[in-house]
Amino acid sequence: MTEPTHDPAEELQAPDEPSEPRWRETLSALLKNRLAAAGMIVLALLILSAVFADLVAPYAYTDGDIVRRLEPPGRDHWFGTDELGRDVLSRVIFGARVSLQVGAVAVGISLMVGTLIGLISGYRGGWIDAVLMRTMDVLFSFPVVLLAIAIVAVLTPSLRNTMIAIGVVFTPIFARVVRGSVLSVREEVYVRASRSLGASDWRIISRHVLPNVAAPVIVQTSLSLAFAILTEAALSYLGIGVQPPRPAWGLMLLDAQGFIPTGAWWMSLFPGLAIFLTVMALNLVGDGLRDALDPKQRSIIQSRGVT
Amino acid sequence: MGRYVLRRTAQAAVALLGVSIVVFALIHLVPGDPVRTALGTRFDQELYETLIARAGLDQPLLLQYWNWLTSALTGDLGVSFRTGQPVTGALLQRLPATMLLAFAALLVGLLIALPAGIVSAVKQGRPVDYAASSFSQIGVSVPDFWFGLLLILVFARSLGWLPPSGYVSPLEDPVEAIRRLILPATTAGVVTGAILTRFVRSSVLEAMGAEHVRLARAKGMPERYILRHHVLRNAWIPVVTITGLQLATLLGGIVVVEVVFAWPGIGRLALDAVVRRDYPVLQGAVLLIATGFLLINLLVDLLYARLDPRITTS
Amino acid sequence: MSGAPEPTPEHDDSTDAEVVLSVRDLEVSFGTKRGRAEVVRGLDYDLHRGETLAIVGESGSGKSVSTLALTKLIPIPPGRVTGTAHLGDTDLISLSEAELVHVRGQRIGFVFQDPMTSLNPVHTIGRQLTEGMRHHLGLSEAAARDRAVELLAKVGIPSPEDRLGDYPHQFSGGMRQRVVIAIGLSCDPEVLIADEATTALDVTTQAQIIDLIAELQADLGMAVVWITHDLGVVAGIADRVLVMYAGEVVEQADAPELFSRPRHPYTVGLLASLPVLGDTERGDLAAIPGLPPPPTSLPPGCGFYPRCSFRSDERCATERPPLREVVAGHLVRSFYEVPEEQSRRASAATRIAIEPPDVRDEGVA
């Protein structure tokens, strides 16, 4: 034998091509995360109870039997009754509607407006970018709750205005996240190639930029929903969010505080627990999404407590 | 370094200007007549005209803004629509209570987060780490006002150990002042602590994984020395930054805790102003808090630059 | 620089130069989710005073881990180290952490790959130089600083007294690596291990660092272990070469012998793929196709079999070849040897490589 006889390149396999579409991969990674999965179950239950509240809740949220006021949790009233004899459990269930509604609409507003701003700012650059980002900076200069209070003050407290206020306050975060993503993609070779071939801006944005932006936006949405619900509850507790007689968890806590001296602990415990579980579920799902989609995105995405 | 300071300060100044515009605009975005709305049933024509004149609302917009801004810079934030008293005075009177609560809460938060974060990083993957992470996750999701109510239920009502609300100045009665500070500071502090724990942990973890730690170990330095001089020494800079930012955030969200415990701070003043439509007071409070927020952020950035030799000496 | 220092006298296993480090049956494995990863599978070698040993291999071959494991610089659960490693009279593998702290830095020094991250950015380099000396040698701050200045001068840093108070970011990459070398030598170790010490540097600086370490070795007499994936780096300076693949030594010989007559298919492949300036003898570069096997699922027979283009023995696929001494001092882990013609053709590269290119004479980086 004088020459090598064997070419190993024939036998060696190419590394596996990704066989599944990316979203399915993400979903399975997400579900493997037990905490996130638990969060998703809680959220599903919550949404179902909110949507089918009329069926699920044992009583109507306005039905108050004065005779049975301030009753501790028992057989007829699992969560007890409040000062007007209303069933706390039912009010908590109906309260889910309000919270989810406010959360969804508010975050929806900030998502749409913020994404638009972020896209324009990141893609166009130049003075538009400077102006838009300085404006976002100014909004960022206000602590979240304070700004929401100020906006509600101007518009007068109501359900609708709470949604608007929270929507405005959360817009800069989405703008920043989207802009960051756009910037990172804009200089990619394939985008510049596309541009040099004369593709219209819109086409470039929809085919190249948006898919890249989708991941951080999804994560941010989940985390912002959590914070939005917390903020709505805080505003309602302060009396300047959702107004009675609508059942809102924050409002229920406001009422509950007055009855602490009488020992009606159940009025404080259950609505707050509902807020807590909802927010926690959303946070867990958000974290899970972030880990499943791309751990490297950590730096741009912001959740509660980081301004 | 000088250039950085200049640039960053200029940025803050621009943002502050923007803030002033937004705050100024608040009163003008109110649908209808703000003064009339504020007076409500106490409406009196003479009072109405006085207030309008004092607030400068009868003048052209730009002139109004200019006057308002220049007055603000000299400390005049107008008068309350409710009491007729100067806003600045009311704010200054309430400021100490808020500052006391904010710093106490931050202290509680650090006392929780520093040990929890460091230990969970050093013992990563072990039960302590999971406990700290769970605590952190829970703390981030808990509504602070609910937590406060629960604390009141347990410690004030059931056990009767601590008062449920109220404020006493530490200058008058230090012991009682502290008794009254415990519950509110714990409420705000535990939540802050939960948030900070995550950052401390990740800061320390990052510092631990650094290549220079590997070399220090290869040099034969003992583990404890490495932890102190090559891990924590590097980790504390981002921790200081985040703590500063947390203080800023605390100032903003403290209004809720002040309400829970009837704490006479600026946050509660702002809320009362909202309810009573007392716009000048609201404006003053928002301006003050937002300015504080911006200033703290600026100071934190400058401090960071000072602490990190890479920025100082380049 | 006129070339490598005098090579140590020609030796075989019964050498007259003192053995500084003697490694036998070194095995390192890690517990992973996918099973036990055998990263080093039975390593034997002797390191002599003043000798330069090169451990060459791809990433994943176990070359770095084999030296880190000597002083347990790898995480011990999940890692596990067995075998013996006698540094003088002491078996390193049997030492406790408290005892190892005294070996690290003091008897075995390290130089790592990336000078940009090896130094702590918030401490002055003076501090990073003196802390080891103060800890191991008990020097006072003043004595340590004096010695630090000497060391910096020795590694070629200009105005060393002024630079003690500087921070790492005030130095270029090449200078930082010199500082790291100075740190490695600060306690007069018996062995200096250079783990990919030039990989992150540009070609000019690489040459300067290689020369620097050779000079220091001639001056101080310590043994040097060069770990690298690039045969070109060690072609001019190694006394003895160990080629590793998939955790095992596949060939081991004195440098001149290995470079002129490689006998293992892997070594032949490595030499054939060396790009060399001025190469007109060989045709296209022949990279070895494929990747090394994952340490959690190693092939039953020869580790290199899946990528081997020779496969001259039926036993290759199923039996693990033993390490055989085919010529005095030259060991090969294979059932056969690469025929002379291919061997000579592949090694043509090194004949060219041993001529130092002029690029080395440009200024200090």
Image (tube, rainbow, N blue to C red):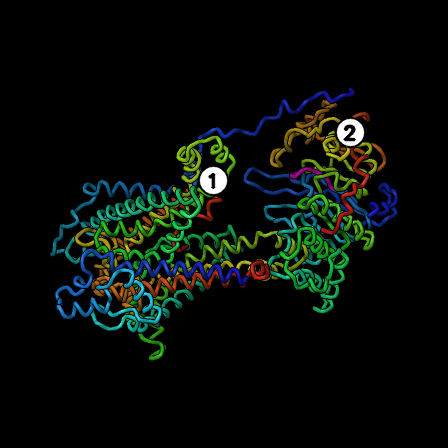
Q: Mark 2 = which residue? A: C280
Prevailing secondary structure class for the magenta stretch in the rendered image: loop
Q: Position of residue C137 (x, y in %)?
A: 73, 64
Foreground of the two, A91 or A12: A12
Q: Amino acid at mark 2?
A: Thr
Q: Is residue C307 above or below residue C2?
A: above
Asked whether, in this view, residue B162 is left or right of residue C167, the answer is left
Foreground of the two, A75 or C242: C242
Residue C270, picture quadrant: top right
Residue drawn at x 73%, y 34% as measured from the top left: C274
Q: What residue occupies the far bottom of the structure in this picture?
A: B172
- In magenta, the rendered stretch is C55-60
Asked whether, in this view, residue C217 is left or right of residue B104, the answer is right
Residue drawn at x 64%, y 24% as measured from the top left: A9
Foreground of the two, A171 or B98: A171
Disc tally is 2
Q: Amino acid at mark 1?
A: Arg
Q: Position of residue C46 (x, y in %)?
A: 79, 45
Asked if marks 2 and 1 touch (Cβ < 8 Å), the reply is no
Q: Mark 1 = which residue? A: A186
**Residues flagged by tags 2 and 1 on a common chain:** no
